[in-house]
Image (cartoon, grey):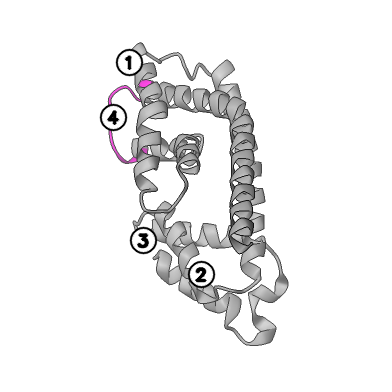
Amino acid sequence: MGYVVGRVLGWLLFHMPNRAKLSRTGDGFVALGITCLAYGLTEMAHGYGFLAVFVAALALCSAERDHAYHEKLHDFAEQLERLLMMALLVAFGGALTDGGLLWALTWQGAAFGLLALFVVRPLSGWIGLAGAGCPTAERAVISFYGIRGLGSVYYLSYALQKGLFEAPDLLWSTLAFIVLVSILLHGATVTAVMRHLDQRQSRGHTQREREALERAR
């Protein structure tokens, strides 16, 4: 479903007669419509809308890879993501303070959360980047930071709708603990780490330029 939606929308955006092409509008708001359309039609067909949106985006991009309109869609989607992230963080803070989101947390849940943050996710990222050609420092930073876990809110909500799980309150509290620690830890350290990484890369480029200049001489 995602592939079909992406290909059809790709034709509508880029290959219709010139006057009717949606890409002529220059409106990034089309990105939201594409997302909702792919997700909604796939869910109506009893598919997994979340993955369908991803596949639809790939199919849409392949319809006209070098078109400037892709940048417009990307920029709008990024701005919309930041807006929704801010709204979700505000709701998350309210749920922590007044909603008792952490009340069901146990020491086992907290231990699992720390294990996920400091072992499972970094190790998964490190393995996933094998063969990507990233320098060791960049690979370590990408593996450790990644996203802050807010996407897990969707996954847990979806799972609880589809099946029965013991102690759903414990699941929500554990998830909230992971997201909270991730926000505090990563938010407090990412600026300094990225600054150090940039400086290290700059020194590396300078050293390589000097070596190239010496060889040329």
Q: Which corner quadrant holds the C terminus?
A: bottom right
Residue drawn at x 36%, y 13% as measured from the top left: 106
Question: In this orientation, which residue lies closer to the viewer: 137 or 62?
Answer: 137
Q: Are marks 4 and 2 in contact (CB under 8 Å)?
A: no
Q: Which residue is mark 4?
A: 165
Q: Position of residue 199 (x, y in %)?
A: 64, 39
Which label sits in the foreground, 3 or 2?
2
Q: Which corner quadrant holds the N terminus?
A: bottom left
Which label sits in the foreground, 4 or 1?
1
Q: Residues within 10 Å of mark 1 (few under 14, many from 20)?
A: few
Q: Earlier in the sequence, mark 4 or mark 2?
A: 2
- Secondary structure of residue under mark 2: helix
Q: Which residue is mark 1?
A: 108
Residue type marked 3 = Ala
Give residue 45's mark: 3
Q: Earlier in the sequence, mark 1 or mark 2?
A: 2
Q: Earlier in the sequence, mark 3 or mark 1?
A: 3
Give yes or no for residue 149 being in the magenta stretch.
no
Give residue 21's mark: none
Q: Position of residue 86 (x, y in %)?
A: 64, 36
Q: Residues within 10 Å of mark 4 (few under 14, many from 20)?
A: few
Residue type marked 2 = Leu
Q: Are marks 1 and 2 in contact (CB under 8 Å)?
A: no
- Secondary structure of residue under mark 4: loop
